[in-house]
Image (cartoon, grey):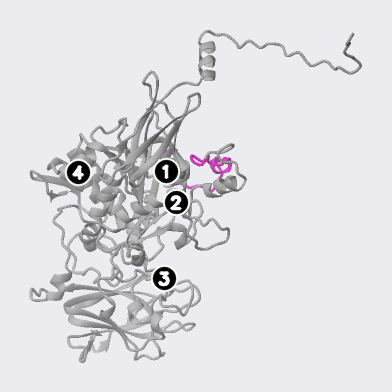
Amino acid sequence: ENHSRRMKTGQTVFFKLPLPMCHRAICHSPSPECPPMGMETLKIDDFQLHASTIKRYGLGAHRGRLNIQAGLYEDDLYDGGWCAGREDPLQWLEVDARRLTKFTGVVSQGRSSLWSSDWVTSYKVMVSNDSHTWVTLRNGSHDLIFTGNREKEIPVRNVFPTPMVGRYLRINPRSWYGGGTICMRAEILGCPMPDPNNYYHRRNEVTTTDNLDFRHHSYKDMRQLMKVVNDMCPNITRIYNIGKSHNGLKLYAIEISDNPGEHEVGEPEFRYLAGSHGNEALGRELLLLLMQFMCLEYRSGNPRIRHLVDQTRIHLLPSVNPDGYEKAFQAGSELCGWSLGRWSQDGMDIHHNFPDLNSILWEAEVKKWIPRKMHNHHVAIPGWYQAKNATVAVETRALVAWMEKLPFVLGGNLQGGELVVTFPYDRTRTQGAVRETSPTPDDHVFRWLAFSYASTHRLMADASRRVCHTEDFAKEDGTINGASWHTAAGSMNDFSYLHTNCLELSMYVGCDKFPHESELPEEWENNRESLLVFMEQVHRGLKGVVKDLRGQGIANAVISVEGIGHDIRTATDGDYWRLLNPGEYQVTARADGYSLTRKMCEVGYEMGATRCDFTLGRTNLSRIKEIMEKFNKQPIRLPVRPLRARRGRQRRWW
């Protein structure tokens, strides 16, 4: 059986999609359950949370949010939950919904901590309209006691037998783990009651006019949706796969271009990928929404989208780790916790499973091997990494082959759990340093690229927004050098920069890794403009073709920019793209067997790369070798006469 979904285009279009499946936390069919109110997504602000007592400020009511993460050390401002100041059955955590709400359930967790074990094992729930008179949920003549957590990380959901209407809700812990104290994190399930006069609700409501498929997609649903998009826009889309997951699921990508399936000389290639951590579902859904949006807007004649598609070859890979995602999807958005499904099936963190090329390059720099013995770019993958028995995920190997096959210029990988854009290097230069700013030679370009996404996001660069967990990235305009946040060897971003021409960044697109599907329209509005603006940055800097005197493109020619110690190489047809900020640059093109050529090229402030072509002539030595090979002749090797010893010989002067 099928249902139709109406999409916005120049004409009425119906999407034929399979009926969605229900699972433990997300049910796509009509359900009496209400969605999360927004403890985790920060829709509920700090002033709406109260508690009977608190252990200290860092364990206040404002920290009692589902999946909130603690700082590394105790006694800081950002601990992992609410903890009561006393241990007795009179403690409570209160949520003010600020309007009448139909409360239907509670999801609870213990405290996030590396050093403590604290969680609530049972609790009561009370509801009030005025915060003075409270009604306890009852089971007949007895107060209803809900079973809480058995450990601190796995969420437990309790649905009320009968929904309760009120403005305030209190969770009253009745028992707790004997080795700890009263601490918890929570999410409240509730539906706001109709109230057109509620100014606060109207002011904070975010709606979208894009009529897209806003729901979480299983692997089968994702594949079907990609096929629907391809059927709707067959002239600009192509579906392909880059390999398979550990469990044999194909890693599907969709190409969006005016000539799908072929690389056009002078047209840059761009990529977005998501889901390297399977439980970070928001990025996956954003890419599925993006491909729908671009197809529909192209059909309706949107000039911005038409220009982007006609001038760029775009690749979207929505699910790098489908095995992990299926685990998180089966548990559900509120119950998968912070880590279920994060790793590949064989336990690899795909995003940090690439070869550590940083160490190879930096060691060569110390030994002064660059540029005599080693290039400052396209660092080779070490042999041990390519061995069959190396601890490398099959998904990572597929990504490496994909990166090497296509001449990507710019890329972004969407992640979750934070609101920030990170850029290379992701590994600290100082050995043993946990965090340290480690800029690349293209640091100014990376900072601009990161800012282009963060500044156009609805929340990311907002200095007044609440911290997701422990770091205030808004004071840095929503961007940060990866290594100055936390060091990570073998990251996708560093590998892409050091092994290919592609500049890759990570976009952490939301505090909630796996938001409820009711949150997807708002998250789409938060990220839509950023996704488009970042793609447009692929047309910033220089572009051109390196040819020989006969007009043939020269592959693998090296393009160097004076003052930037990182070169790039031309693609198969001799075309290249060099992302640069506005300015005047001295650029050199060189290739084996050719004389180098140098010229000044200027990058303007307007959008659109500056054309900077090169024509290289053959060197005399290479021409001689070419002629001799053509006529099948060998070089003439004259015998070398050794110098005779002059010992014993005397020069006659008479």
In this view, the residue in front, 641 or 115, is 641
Q: Nearer the viewer, residue 326 or 490?
A: 490
Q: Residue 404 at what x, y percent from top left?
A: 43, 37
User: Which residue, given by chain and number where applicable, does mark 4 sit on?
Assistant: 305
**Is 396 a magenta residue?**
yes
Marker disc for residue 350:
2
- Above or below residue 540? Residue 93 is below
Front residue of 524/546: it is 546
Give the mark toward the camera: 2 or 3: 2
At 17% across and 82% down in the image, what residue appears?
A: 166
Crowding at dot 4, Cα within 10 Å, few <14 / some 14-19 / many 20+, comes out as: some
Q: Amino acid at mark 2?
A: Ile
Give me the residue at 62% from left, 45% from top.
Answer: 367
Q: Tag 3: residue type?
A: Glu
Could you tell which of marks 4 and 1 lies nearer the N-terminus? 4
SS state under label 1 = helix
- Kindly indicate whether the residue at mark 1 contacts the one at mark 4 (C-beta within 8 angstroms): no
The residue that disc 3 covers is 153
Mark toward the start of the polypeptide (2 vs 1): 2
Do the CB atoms of the residues marked 2 and 1 lie less than 8 Å apart?
Answer: yes
Q: Which residues are magenta?
A: 376-401
* Label whose residue precedes the other's in the sequence (2 or 3): 3
Residue beneath the point at 12% across and 43% down: 300
* Figure quadrant of residue 400: top left
On the image, the x and y values in percent for residue 540 come to 31, 43
Quadrant containing the C terminus in the rendered view:
top right
Q: Is residue 550 magenta?
A: no
Look at mark 1 in the image and give the residue it sits on.
399
Can see residue 345?
no
Is the residue 182 above or below the residue 222 in the image? below
